[in-house]
Image (cartoon, helix red, strand yellow):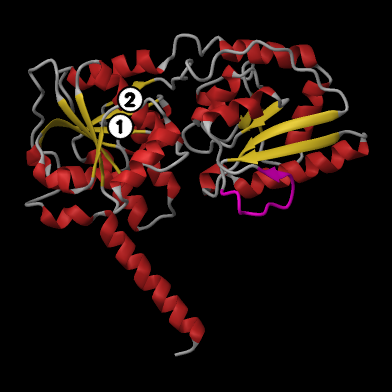
Amino acid sequence: MGIKDFLMAFRYERKIEKFSKEIGNIYDSEGDIVCKEQIYPEKPNCKIAFIVPEISKFSGGHTGILRLGTYLCEMGHEVHYIAINNVPVQVMIDNAKTNFPNWKGVIKDRQALKENKYDIGIATKWNTCYHLLAYQNNFGLKAYFIQDFEPFFYPMGDHYLLSLNTYKLGLKMISLGPWNGQMIKKFIPYAKVYNIEFPVELGAYKIVKREIKIEKNLKLAVYIKRDPKRATFLLLEHLKYLIYKMREKGIEVEVNFFGIEKNIKLPIGNNMGKLNTDNLIKLYVNAHFGIVASLTNISYVNYEMLACGLPVVDFADGSAPSFFTDKEMIFLESHPHDLYNKISYYMNNQNRLNNLVLEGQKRLGTVTWASQAKKFAQILFSKEEYI
């Protein structure tokens, strides 16, 4: 066996091992993996567990879960975050402090699934549904907080099918925004999906009223990830063409990327790495446009940029048009020339650019984490018949 064959075999074996760990607890369950019974809590203050892969530093999704859990704590509930991956608890505590310094609750390792009893268990990613149901006798109400339509993360295959099937397991499903529910119903028409809106933490991202003025320098804040759902390669092609055409006009373009590991060298611009809230705000308030690619569920980043007075560019082919109109956000076609076309238009019509931000900000004032956590709790405790 040559070195190439050896490496291929090694990588394939690691993939098999990783997949087994992802659905690990399924082997401990008896019978089919499906919700057998929903037991609604009768007491006002409950013991609630969010089942998470882990708590990662600079993760918007994990930070959102911490925010929900914190507000549930402030309502009088006891909240645990049970991590199924083998990450040390102290590391996750430190990550939680970085993401959301005032977070509340308790982080537990996967043993808590076996050892503890909870009034409510809430899955937060497709594979955590299987871990939750494997120990469902330790949970009363079984719910699923859906932050994205996860089948779209994968090509047709094992992960695609198992993630799609989580919507058939009988969990009480609560979506972040309506788009996930719309997608689920395309595949499973009988599914019942509740939803909360995308909130903005106005304590951190205060509404900034400012006038965008663009002259000889154009500053962009670009959210980039390694995930295919963030269209990394397409974004780079858009930006290359934009820089090329703007230089022909004597305009320099400053591109500041964030959201990807800082050690990754990108062909253009400045990679600022993964930023905390304070540094994100500094980036946003000094930029002329924010660029995001939301090909699945929209990002928290869109809302945070708008709060900071930054006009947002996102893709027409993604979910952003389900949340905003073209009077509130700029939508790109996939052709790499379109970013240049849209930015050129708004540079020549800066009054319209500033009005676009003001219209977008109107959506943010009432959609706070406090209001949506209250709605989340109301949905959890509602005994409306669930199909």
Q: Is residue 53 visible?
A: no
Instruction: Specify few, some or many for label 1: CA neighbours under 10 Å numbering under 14, 14-19, or 20 or more.
Output: many
Could you tell me residue 338's position as x and y percent? 74, 35
| 357 up-or-down from 226: above or below | above
Residue located beneath label 2 in the image: 68
Q: Are marks 2 and 1 in contact (CB under 8 Å)?
A: yes
* Front residue (pair 220, 91): 91
Residue 244 colored magenta? no
Say which quadrant the C terminus sits in: top left
Residue located beneath label 1 in the image: 145
Q: Amino acid at mark 2?
A: Leu
Residue at 32 percent of width and 44 percent of height: 90
* Front residue (pair 176, 167): 176
Could you tell me residue 218's position as x and y percent? 80, 30
Position of 251 with respect to 59 (left or right) is right
Could you tell me residue 113's position as x and y percent? 15, 44
At mark 1, the secondary structure is strand
Q: Which mark is residue 197?
A: none
Predominant SS of the magenta segment: loop
Range of the magenta residues?
261-271
Residue at 44 percent of width and 33 percent of height: 99
